[in-house]
Amino acid sequence: MTDRNAFKQRLDAARARQGLDPGATKPAASGGLPTGNWGIGLRAGVEVVSALIAGAGLGFALDRWLGTWPWLFLVGFMLGAAAGVLNVYRLFSPRKGAGNVDDGKD
Amino acid sequence: MAAEGKAIDALHQFELATVFGPVGASVGLTQSNLFMIISSGLIIALMIYGMRPRAVVPGRLQSVAESAYSFIDDMLLSQVGPEGRRFFPFVFTLFMFVLFGNMLGLFPYAFTYTSHISLTFALAMLVFLLITVVALALHGSKFFGYFFPEGAPLWLAPIIIRVEVVSYISRPISLSIRLFANMVAGHVMLKVFATFVVMLGALGTFGPFLAIMPLAINVALVGFEVLVAFLQAYVFAILTCIYLHDAVHLH
């Protein structure tokens, strides 16, 4: 009865994938972000630039509002730089709990 | 057009103009809007006509529709988990809209609406507002614990919280800049090499032979751009899923 076993295995796999069996172990996360050299490099660059824009923009907006130009802009720039480094660090450190939500890793 | 006055005008293709003469001008309908409508129509047509046969063994159009559906479904399941299912309509719409925008933009005379930061930033803001609202609705005030990782020394809190907040705010910016920059860069490169073909082609006897080189590069670039068009739509969708995962599970 190998056929029947094969069907049961596939059914179990499908049920586990759809999250219908609460006790079942989840399959490892498939897919994910592209990991080519160029992909990683461009992503890191975009992360740094966007964090800088966010930090400096926030500081600039607060400056406009409070009339403290240029001090909050400078602080925001530094915060943006730090956030950019943090973003790049997150990019390279393995993401916690991606796809294997309840195996105790997150 | 591009080679007018011996100058390379690669950015002209991104300029907005109204279509349909005075009718379009009076309502402010630009090519960008036109192509948004076209791509929405194509997506709806694909899903409606593709799924009309409801065959057990799918035909061509039905298998395209089904694979698009299961692609996003698998992505949500593996990245967010089963509870991510409820976001399927949102992520699917987003993915198809960006994918069709990128792909339609590669056709001659077409306009790439994803090459405008106003559109990509609007989409990214939509994602950003959604993940913030979802995180607040699911976790309430515990959401703010997201900005201060457990186990960090308390005296560092003023710095860490601010840096984390800036990092969180940078999400929609990085999401929109990535898509926008990729599409603009690709189309500018195509335009520049296409201009080289025209310029070299007009260069006397040997010109047409020299023009083969940029032409070959352009042929390769078009293939590369198809890859980028799909990849950027995929990256946009998967980053949305990753952010949704963070919002639902909150680390």
Image: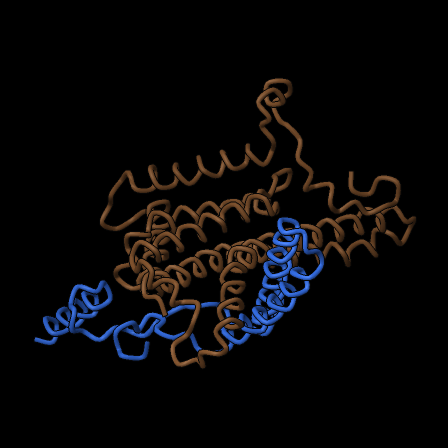
Chain colours: A blue, B brown
Furthest toward the left, the residue is A1
Between residue A87 and residue B92, name the one nearer to us: A87
Which quarter of the rendering shows the C terminus of chain B? bottom left
Between residue B152 and residue A13, name the one nearer to us: B152
Question: How many numbered tags mark residues here?
Answer: 0
Please provide percent x and percent y for residue B27. Answer: 57, 22
Can residue A75 be seen by looking at this rendering? yes
Furthest toward the top, the residue is B22
Q: Is residue B159 above or below residue B3?
A: below
Q: In which quarter of the image is residue B67?
A: bottom left
Q: Is residue A33 above or below residue B12?
A: below
Q: Would residue A52 appear left or right of B123 to someone viewing this image? A: right
Please provide percent x and percent y for residue B118. Answer: 59, 44
Please provide percent x and percent y for residue B165. Answer: 50, 63
Which quarter of the rendering shows the N terminus of chain B? top right
- Residue at point 34% right, 50% down? B63
Q: Quadrant of residue A78?
A: bottom right
Between residue A38 and residue B58, name the one nearer to us: A38
Can residue B231 be seen by looking at this rendering? no
- Residue at point 14% right, 68% down? A7
Q: Would residue B52 appear left or right of B92 to someone viewing this image? A: left
Q: In which quarter of the image is residue A4?
A: bottom left
Please provide percent x and percent y for residue A92. Answer: 51, 77
